[in-house]
Image (cartoon, helix red, strand yellow):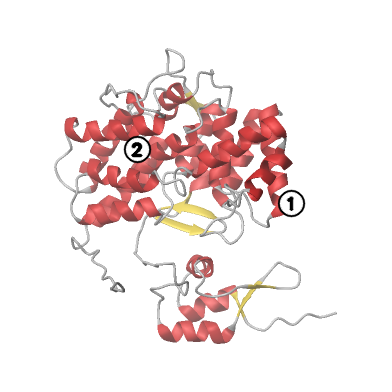
Amino acid sequence: MIHHVPGLTTQEAAKRLGVKVETLYAYVSRGLIQRERSADGRSSFYDARAIEDLARRGRPRQSSRSTSLNLLIETRLTSLSPHGVRYRGLPSSDLAVTHTFEEVADWLWLGAMPDASSAAPWAGERIDVPVTRDLVGALRVAAAIASTRLPMADGRDARSVAVSGRRLIATLTDSLPRVGGQRVPQLMLPGTDGDRRAVRDSIAGRLWLRLSPQRPQPGMLALLNATLVLLADHELAASTLAVRVAASTWADPTAVVMAGQGALSGPLHGGASVAVRAMLERATEIGAARAVAEVVDSGQRIPGFGHKVYVDADPRAVVLLRLLREVSGRTRVLSVVDEVHDAVRQRIDRAANVDFALASMAMIGGMPADGGEVVMGIARIAGWLAHAIEEYQEAPLRFRPRASYVGA
């Protein structure tokens, strides 16, 4: 039996709209156009009339969803597609296993990789942070204190911001209380010539001592470094938009980071992994099926599955979960992670996202409940400052939307 599916192929639709395939996928995820699957599920088709209407209207600026606002900002930093995330054209999935977080941050900021053989550890200033109820709170307090203490490099050019960014990330990492050993474990990564290279005093190693009392098993420190790389930027997430707005006023790098922290602190953004962690912890007590059922019965959305940008799987989660299984072995915690994953997939047709992978990594690494949120809070500084560098080059104060008054 032959199934006939009318419409345009992905390449035809993208060509008619004059956009890249990645942009076409973004239009689908934002509800601007609909995508249909072929009978064998291997191809996608788009209604020719809908594509023609969209092409005649021009590049969409506002989503058809009444509750969603759509800003289109040109960037040379990060591109998203179902196949993965690219930083300045390089696949983040490759960078995650071959480069340090510090090297990738410089790539985002400067568009150039530092010489790995001569790169010195990032230096910061340790700040005595008052006792807070959680590590995320300590991170925000450290940023607030750093804004009054750390000397910021003069200028808004890329090199000046990079100098400030290295100092700020090192300071915030080193200011978190230690719970691990006395020496920073060495990060081992594959070298370009095939031999493994040891990286001393890496941000991943210093962060591990603040998040886990365990001595990292072989590969776990590299997994944490990969997590930092994959979370470094994700285009215009809510916190990054907040950063762009702050940078448009010429706020300094520390103030820009604090703007991002405010948006990231929401339970639907940076705090999403905390909800996943709670579900995983509950699953260890009563079983995966019952733990997932509790979430469903409470009327809450199941955390850690589905994503606004990706129609199918979150490519970052695919990479992290694969690496997690490679380095952790068959442990009880990993079994719980797999059981929860299967229990959720039986209920909803949504793939795990990066929050699920992040919470799983933190739990297997013996990190606190908000450990995943701290990892994201450190990692995303790299992307925030990269976007700030771009925004500093734009006309200032360009974010001035108008409101439609509907009150009395």
Query: Residue 185: horizontal and vertical position, in percent?
Result: 47, 19
Q: Amino acid at mark 2?
A: Pro
Query: Which residue is nearer to you in this view: 276 or 405?
Result: 405
Circle 1: element type: helix
Query: Residue 357: horizontal and vertical position, in percent?
Result: 57, 41
Residue 177 lies, with reference to residue 108, above or below; the image says: above
Kindly report the distance in space between the C-alpha atoms of the residues bearing marks 2 and 1: 46 Å
Q: Which residue is mark 1?
A: 346
Which quadrant would the C terminus be assigned to in this image?
bottom left
Q: Residue furthest left?
A: 154
Between circles 2 and 1, the one closer to the viewer is: 1
Q: How many numbered badges does the structure rendering display? A: 2
Instruction: Left or right? Give the position of 376 relative to 244.
Output: right
Query: Which residue is nearer to you in this view: 18 or 58?
Result: 58
Q: Residue at x 58, y 85 (%)?
A: 48
Query: Residue 303: horizontal and vertical position, in percent?
Result: 57, 47
Residue 114 is labelled as 2
Circle 2: element type: loop
Mark 2 / mark 1, whichever is N-terminal: 2
Instruction: Left or right? Give the position of 158 relative to 121.
Output: left
